[in-house]
Amino acid sequence: MSDTAERVKKIVVEHLGVEEAKVTENASFIDDLGADSLDTVELVMAFEEEFGVEIPDDAAEKIQTVKDAIDFIDANS
Amino acid sequence: MFDLTGKRALVTGASGGIGGAIATALHAQGAVVALSGTRQEALSAVAEKLADRTYVIPANLSDPESVEALAKSALEAMGGVDILINNAGITRDQLLMRMKDADWADVMRVNLESAFRLSRAMMRPMMKARYGRIISITSVVGVTGNAGQANYAASKAGMIGFSKSLAQEVASRGITVNCIAPGFITSPMTDALGEDQRTRLLGGIPAGRFGEGDDIASAAVYLSSAEAGYVTGQTLHVNGGMAMI
Ligand SMILES: NC(=O)c1ccc[n+]([C@@H]2O[C@H](COP(=O)([O-])OP(=O)(O)OC[C@H]3O[C@@H](n4cnc5c(N)ncnc54)[C@H](OP(=O)(O)O)[C@@H]3O)[C@@H](O)[C@H]2O)c1
């Protein structure tokens, strides 16, 4: 697992209070991990902070799964 | 109770009667306050009276860019904003049939749009802090309506709908969003009333007096406090009983 993936998963586990095993790459924040729309906003804020990237609103809307987040960060940091 | 030590408040319209009273009261409870308005001198006078824990950040709220800049400056100056008081407001009274586009647009921009922009700018920091108090000063006429004030009443009613919606969005994050609706508050405007008019108006106020800035400020202290954390999406009417709604 890449370093990005590990850090992303750690943030998701902390913010959503879900079991680590559930945070697979294809897990959807809302459908699989029980996030509400505000949680997803907060996750994006946490990613921005952790990785020092700026995630614009239109990109943030497309980040729906753990993998979406990892890919965006890898492509933009 | 109602201790605000360490809390940081941005008060718009702090150069005015009600805003000055609110800033003074929050400060007295221990808050750091950023005072905003367009008249630098009037703001500095308030800041001088309060002495410490104040910042003066002038801004013209009819200009969207200045509103965004105000939010940024306040966040930077105080290292965050825990309490936002949307108090600045103007009237451009006119019967609707004579109301100019500018009368409508100016009132909407200063009263309603600035509250939207400032609140939006505070979302991120307040969500992170898991604490926030957004209080907008609306008016009794936003609920009752008033002939000659279609623009003003619409802007004030708009603040109430705005606050209720935002309150639902962020309640789970420790952020409350409320309105205070003053009735008639002593101001240069009420001072200028003739004796007849005064008597007539007072006849409609069971408390038998106009309100003071401090009456509004006390309500603002309460809604700003940690103790009011379970109160959200509400409009607190402070009007001596002139409208019981
Ligand atoms: N007084 C009442 O009876 C009453 C009743 C119900 C509701 N209210 C509401 O209470 C609030 C305060 O009223 P008040 O009686 O204290 O009135 P005020 O003394 O006239 O104060 C109005 C404040 O708004 C600020 N303001 C106006 N236009 C602005 C602009 N373009 N940019 C930035 N700031 C601007 C003024 O700042 P500058 O002077 O520095 O420009 C001033 O500090 C208003 O929202 C009003 O609608 C008042």
Image (cartoon, coloured by chain):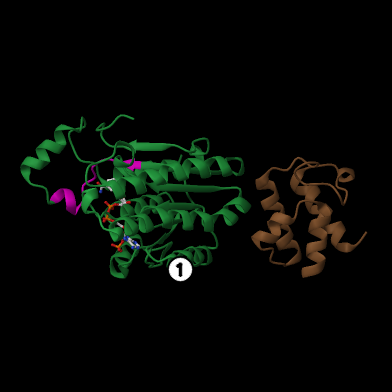
Residue at 30 percent of width and 51 percent of height: B18
Q: Is residue B69 above or below residue B224?
A: below
On screen, residue A46 versus residue B28, left or right, reads: right
Q: Is residue B209 found inside the magenta-colored segment of the image?
A: no
Q: Is residue B188 found inside the magenta-colored segment of the image?
A: yes
Viewer-closest of B222 and B164: B164
Subunit of label 1? B
Q: Position of residue B82 (x, y in %)?
A: 51, 53
Quadrant containing ligand 1 reads bottom left
Residue at 40 percent of width and 63 percent of height: B52
Quadrant holding the C terminus of chain A = bottom right
Q: Is residue B25 above or below residue B49?
A: above
Q: Is residue B222 above or below residue B33?
A: above
Whether residue B22 appears in this view of the structure is yes
Q: Is residue B71 above or below residue B187?
A: below
On screen, residue B109 versus residue A13, left or right, reads: left
Q: Residues within 10 Å of mark 1 (few under 14, many from 20)?
A: few
Residue at 26 percent of width and 31 percent of height: B241
The brown chain is: A
Q: Position of residue B151 (x, y in %)?
A: 30, 50
Magenta stretch bounds? B181-191
On screen, residue A50 versus residue B107, left or right, reads: right
- Give the residue furthest to the right: A1
Residue ID for mark 1:
B65
Q: Colour of chain B?
A: green
Q: Position of residue B101 (x, y in %)?
A: 30, 59
Amino acid identity at mark 1: Glu
Whether residue B8 appears in this view of the structure is no
